Image: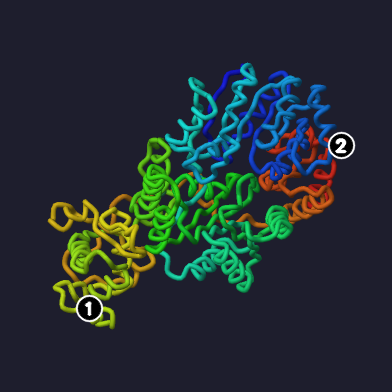
Amino acid sequence: MTDGGDCLVLMPTGGGKSLCYQLPSLLRDGCGIVVSPLIALMRDQVEGLLDTGVKAAVLNSSLSWEEASAIEQRLLAGDLDLLYIAPERLLTPRCLELLSRARLALFAIDEAHCVSQWGHDFRPEYIKLSILAERFPTVPRIALTATADELTRSEIVSRLKLDGAPRFVASFDRPNIRYEIIEKQNAKSQLQTFIAERHAGEAGIVYCLSRAKVDETAASLASAGIPALAYHAGLNAAVRARHQDRFINEDGVVIVATIAFGMGIDKPDVRFVAHLDLPKSIEAYYQETGRAGRDGKPADAWMTYGLADIVQQRRMIDQSTGKDAYKRVSAGKLDALVGLCETAGCRRLRVLEYFGEAPGQPNCGNCDNCLSPPRVWDGTIVAQKALSCVYRTGQRFGAGHLIDVLIGNSTDRVAQLSHDQLSVFGVGAELNEKQWRTVIRQLVGLGHLQPDSEAFGALKLTESARSVLKGERKVMLREQAAASATRKRTTKGKTSKRDSTSAPASPAVAGGYKKLSDSNLLSALRSWRTSIAKQRKVPAYVILHDATLEGIASSRPTTHDQLRTVAGIGDKKLERYGDVLLSLVRSAAS
Ligand code: ZN
């Protein structure tokens, strides 16, 4: 990459993606131009670079004319290593002309998946970036993204004219993130319990689909004593900026947000990402959960989901104004995500396979299914009952009514429709309502039932349902972890069977969930960092990372040379903070 060819780099966040353009920019002659959406959020990254001695700057619309022209002069004078520019600014004739007069090391197109019309981050101005290949044929272009399936990858290549460019694909595995997907019961109280029991006092992101739900959820967390702030496009810009700043700069703030939040956020110590609603695809899920644990320490990706989520997402696809091809691709992506939710196997494996990786091990040891393998049972007979109930009632009803018929509830609606006269009425009395809900959801997840695009909430049979009804296909269902403790099985053929594969403990995370004991030195270091960060108006991690503070606290260096061996302490940091850090170590020892 340093000797100047085009390339496509696919690398998970936290995988050193930004190094891929920072390094060649520094080694090659001239300035590296970084094209990134949401340029305003790059401020922290630039602050961090300045702190390590890299000459970096941002050109965006928040600068005054004088400030912008000072940066332009520095670019022309060869006094910049890296310049961040938003795509819409870059594409102006004036900016292109400016760049043509400067010596350029490379173009780095960050978040390159924004070029994909199928993707959830599509930005029309990204498509126009193909002009870079025409105007600057000799300047290497590097496209970077943290998430892209095969379809998106080839779209990036063709849109950005990277044909023939080598691809560098790093593993998408984020071993420190623990994946967990549970059945939705009372989402708000499930979330509260999750935070209270596992992440009290820690920073996290909660994703919801709608603005109303964001507001509601933030309020309910706040009333439970959890410092939670809302973030969505409906809030005014000042409130959004304030909430984002508090999330980044303060300790232990939970942000509740729509997917409008997150891109460009590089806070390393986000300890959990929770989804209260189903994302649109595995890419979206991976990208959103990838905001947890960028510091490499244990973090949780937690999601609660239910049948209503699948129906809702399906409906959004069906009602979208997109072309049929778009709807088909979207539906396929949703199906893959639902498959991830319903699998009884390793979640990480599913995600990695989706991105085209073939991990060597069958178990990761750090997802819910590996840590406590779900019970799997032969649900063929139960499935047949549910599917014939759908058939007999005319494929026009949702889960609620179907369950009433299966259990034999003589509701008004059942009587009105004479569904109590059907052979399937009461045929499924061995399961209760909640259990049936789980079964029906899984039948949707397994593709035997599908939400009707015409009638909201109605479920209809698919092609594969036929073979289940004919007895040609076995249906294995998973028991829900939460429900399994209280569930009693009486009917033959539904006896539980424990999956025999046992999960090995993950070496990367074993014991990692124990909180570090807060030594005096560590808390002294932290409070020093907080005050410096306030003074310099930057996030605390720009000063020094948590891991660096912990490294100092455990090794207790007494000289500059010893301090220099702690990870995260470079010459610049040593020069700037060396003396004060050593004096903190000394005073903690005395
Ligand atoms: Zn696993």
Circle number at residue 66: 2
**In terms of sequence position, does the residue under pointer 1 or pointer 2 come before the other?**
2
| Residue 504, visible in the rendered structure | no
Observer-side mark, 1 or 2, equals 2
Q: Position of residue 380 (x, y in %)?
A: 19, 59
Side (left or right) of 583 relative to 5 = right
The residue shown at (74%, 55%) is 523
Quadrant (top left, top right, bottom left, bottom right) of the N terminus: top right
Residue bearing the label numbered 1: 408
The residue shown at (24%, 70%) is 489
Q: In the image shown, does 364 or 347 lie closer to the viewer?
A: 347
Q: Position of residue 223 (x, y in %)?
A: 62, 73
- Crowding at dot 1, Cα within 10 Å, few <14 / some 14-19 / many 20+, comes out as some
Q: Position of residue 264 (x, y in %)?
A: 64, 44
| Residue 389, visible in the rendered structure | yes
* Pointer 1 with pointer 2, Cβ within 8 A: no
Q: In the image shown, does 389 or 515 lie closer to the viewer?
A: 389
